[in-house]
Image: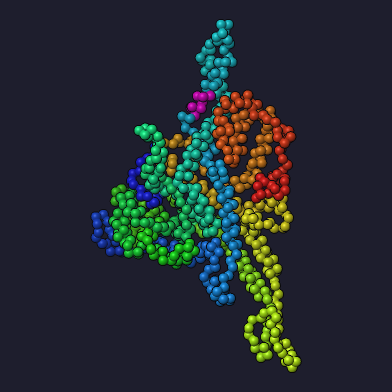
Amino acid sequence: MMQAPQYAIPPQAGVPTHKPLTTEPLPPVPAGVLSAASAQPQASGSPGLNTQVVASLGLFLRAQYDRSKQERVSSGIEEKMIRAKYARALEYEPAKKAQIAALFDASYEPPYMPVIETKCRALEDWVMDVYFQAGQRPFDVQNTPDPMVSQEVQDLVRMNYKEVIARQIVQEQVMPRADGGRGSLDPNTLDALIEEAMQAKAKMIEAEIKRTAKEMTEKFSITVEDRLAEGGWYQALRELVHDICTYPAAFMAGPEERMVTRRKRVFDPQLGRYVTKHSDAPGEKFRRVSPINVYPLVGGKTCRDGMIERTQYNPMDIQAMKGVQGFNDAEISAVLGEIESGSLREWTAIDSRIANLDNKSSNSMYMGDNVDALIYWGQAPGKLLIEWGMNAKTQVITDPTRWYRVYAIQIGNHTIMARLNPNPDGRVNYFKASFIQDPDKFWNISLPDVLWPHQVTANAVIRACGFNVGIASGPIIEQDIDRIPDRGPLHALKRFFSTGSQMANGRAMNFYTVQLITGPLRDFYEFIMTLADYDSGVPRMAHGGQGPGGGVTNTASSMSMFLSTSARGVKAVIEHIDRGITEPSVEAEAYYILDNDESISQPPGELKIIAKGSSALIAKEQSAIRLKELLAETNNPVDMQIITADGRKHLLRDAMKALPIDLDKVLPEERQIIEQMTGAPMAAGLMEPQNGGGPGMPSAALSMAGDRMGGQDFSLFGGGA
């Protein structure tokens, strides 16, 4: 059963997963910080609470946020994020729109070509298609190469082998008697024979121990997958796919402990039927964090280097924090008293622009009772933490002259919570990935950044096309108003009167035709789109367009080769998600379960999390063909004696995972049932090869790309593979 929490956890108030607190100190505090904090005058307050000192910790956190905010603005990251949001909303930025209006007219509505939006949407679909495949999970929990299996499991495996060997020895060594019975074998002789056989099968026993460890780990991985699904991990992963295709970085937070209301069906013996019960229990939650609300500490390259998240709480959330370990009740009461004033907001220069792009009224920012909060993961001086009250109950801070890794929540000028980082290894419960990774940068290059020149040029070309078509749609007329003062519009059969003397001075009206140049502009636009394909790594075929080179990609093999080359960029993106988000977040959840849930069976030894997103991109289109080949090639008596019917069952199960069928109804689990159905354990499952091919022959011809050769009908996007 899950261990009962030592304190109540308010709903919606994320609390990092708990491990034993570490008091490992960091480098000494610079003298200037402590002297500035010590110089603050002391004010009397409630027992155990020095309000001025509390303010000094709050001022320290406030200074960290102000520096981080200024750094993000001066680096241009905010403008890049806003620019990406405008591009995906198919809108011009206000300054650009004003410049266009000055050239044309205030009523002119300039067209906006969806270059960035189309590529981002195609990349999102591609990543989602790879990561969320039917019957597959995007990660795997594995043992280390030499798992530390418990002695109990090792003894159990050896005992089973010993019993099997003993039965075999008795059957082979003891001769039957005339009365139908069997003779006896000296116990010492039997033990010696068993020991000799055990030594001969030592490698097999070790292999069986590792196989048992693998089965235990696989059972544990199912538990991890179930808890991730309940905690919203898959939903958060789906949401951050949009971020990694749009912003310089994407973020996931978790696992965070929260009190959640769970619905469960239980049997009621009095009613004699199942009823629905609701109960509050602590649970882990994962969530997507908007990059717009993330502020890395100055100089940070990773989330572990320190960061601040700007979030919002409602009054009920804040009220529920009272009495929770690590929270300051006096500061919480002060926050509740200031909510109605509307001053507990962290305004930034881009808030109104974000609200407009999110289809929200600018006035809505000033409405409601929610307050902004700053969640701080970083370092703080030990002296400020002691004076804030962290050592009120137990001595957590051992050296006031050193810095410690902390987790704090700041609302306005009030530090309502401060704790040491609950992770002994110093990590934070945030995970990050980017479209293009640079280990020396926190914010990296996004897909809209790569395509911004293409977007600007495409918009200029399409505006020029529209302008050219407009002025070329009719003649430009020059009229001599001294001879023809008529200013009315031209129409069919309209007559103008003149004399011969007037005609001697030249024509009264001249007509000029503007050359239509949409053809060259169209060719240039096509050139820009081709550059966008190569520079982004997202070919237009991924979103329904024609490939470059005309008929070069009209067959399945040529298209597969082209997409395999194009998929390198997409593979890199998925690799970034694998290493930056999937593996560390799943590992955090796995060890949270091991540390807090005593009801599960513990997997042996150390665990490693293997993300399978990038490998799935390579194998998806070809794995089904390869597996079908393997089934056909091993469908012969020699191979069946090696893999047995049980091994063929596992091959069939893997081949059927992607199909909408119930595997448990089609493939029996018990080996005895398979043997009964097939007739023999070794030669079971032998069938006549399909398509007239003999054993060991592939079922269909394959191209150099590994695909079935069948023309356009077997194209990757046409449903061939």
At which x and y percent is residue 353?
47, 66
Q: Is residue 310 visible?
A: yes
Quadrant for the N terminus, please. Answer: top left
- Segment tinted magenta in the rendering: 154-161
Residue beneath the point at 44% across and 41% down? 593
Q: Is residue 181 above or below residue 382?
A: above
Quadrant for the C terminus, please. Answer: top right
The majority secondary structure of the magenta stretch comes to helix
Identity of the residue furthest to the bottom in this view: 501
Q: Quadrant of residue 444?
A: bottom right
Decide which of 19, 181 is in the foreground and name it: 181
Residue beneath the point at 55% across and 61% down? 88
- Magenta region includes residue 155: yes
Image-based side of 214 in relation to 454, left or right: left
Q: Is residue 71 visible?
A: no
Image-based side of 620 in relation to 26, left or right: right
Residue beneath the point at 73% across and 91% down? 499
At which x and y percent is residue 216?
50, 34
Image-based side of 4 in relation to 532, left or right: left
Decide which of 105, 336 is in the foreground and name it: 105
What kind of colouring is applied to the model shown? rainbow
Q: Is residue 456 above or below residue 551?
A: below
Decide which of 57, 326 is in the foreground and name it: 326
